[in-house]
Image (cartoon, grey):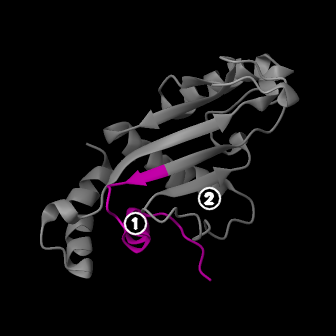
């Protein structure tokens, strides 16, 4: 079992229950999944970008990404229907906690002039999305990087969670939120 998952079950659950006075243990917010997503609009002009992204996602997460296709053709952007325009990976259970541990302890401290992650990226339903500007901060991304590509990491908490509860959950898990 992951150290972070063990910490959640042994310490964080009881702290959240005490702080928010939950009557039922099923009300306690939990991290359900982490979704890593990258839009690949540049695939229209550079086919190599798709292969690079798939390899990076496999090395970063240990899981093969799902390719996302365009639902409609958009002539202004030179996109045809069913053309691959993005990819995503959904992490759950042990892989999710392992990725979160690596993100908090290894990746985020590597960012230059890092002062914490922004607090205002919650969606109103307890989910948090973090934008990463360059993929090279992950230790698994090696070799010659032809272009800096970013992606989004979404932390999905249990339904019914408010932003305050979700922020407290992520803070207790170790997310370094920016101090205002």
Tell me if mark 2 has few (under 14), some (14-19) or many (20+) residues whose alpha carbon lies within 10 angstroms of its own: some
> Which portion, as a residue range, is magenta?
155-180
User: Magenta span has 167?
Assistant: yes
Q: Is residue 97 magenta?
A: no
Is 154 positioned to the left or the right of 80 in the image? left
Locate residue 61, reporting x and y percent. Answer: 50, 33
Q: Nearer the viewer, residue 98 or 79?
A: 79
Q: Nearer the viewer, mark 1 or mark 2?
A: 1
Q: Looking at the image, which residue is at 83% across and 34% down?
A: 147
Is residue 115 visible in the rendered image? The answer is yes
Q: Quadrant of residue 67?
A: top right
The image shows residue 150 at horizontal and vertical percentages of: 71, 43
Q: Quadrant of the C terminus?
A: bottom right
Horizontally, residue 109 falls left or right of residue 15, namely right
Disc 2 secondary structure class? helix
Q: Is there a contact, CB below 8 Å, between mark 1 and mark 2?
A: no
- Horizontal side of 110 relative to 171 (left or right) equals right
Question: What is the CA distance from the residue labelled 1 to the residue labelled 2?
Answer: 22 Å
The image quarter containing residue 39 is top right
Which residue matches tag 2? 109
Element assignment for label 1: helix
Q: Is residue 66 above or below residue 168?
A: above
Residue nearer the viewer, 146 or 120: 120
Q: Residue 108 occupies which quadrant of the picture?
A: bottom right
Q: Which residue is the site of mark 1?
A: 166
Q: Where residue 37 sits: x, y (%)?
A: 59, 38
Residue sitting at x 31%, y 62%: 160
Q: Which quarter of the image is occupied by the N terminus?
A: top left
């Amino acid at each position: 079992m992951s150290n972070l998952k063990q910490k959640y079950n042994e310490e964080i659950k009881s702290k959240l229950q005490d702080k928010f006075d939950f009557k039922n243990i099923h009300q306690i917010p939990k991290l359900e999944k982490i979704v890593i997503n990258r839009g690949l609009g540049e695939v229209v002009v550079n086919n190599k970008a798709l292969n690079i992204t798939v390899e990076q996602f496999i090395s970063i997460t240990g899981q093969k990404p799902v390719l996302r296709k365009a639902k409609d053709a958009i002539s202004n952007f030179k996109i045809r229907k069913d053309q691959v325009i993005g990819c995503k990976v959904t992490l759950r259970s042990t892989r999710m906690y392992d990725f979160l541990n690596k993100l908090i302890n290894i990746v985020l401290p590597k960012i230059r002039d890092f002062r914490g992650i922004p607090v205002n990226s919650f969606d109103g339903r307890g989910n948090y999305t973090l934008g990463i500007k360059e993929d090279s901060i992950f230790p698994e991304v090696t070799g010659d990087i032809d272009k800096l590509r970013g992606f989004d990491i979404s932390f999905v908490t249990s339904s019914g969670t408010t932003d305050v509860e979700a922020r407290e959950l992520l803070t207790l898990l170790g997310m370094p939120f920016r101090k205002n």
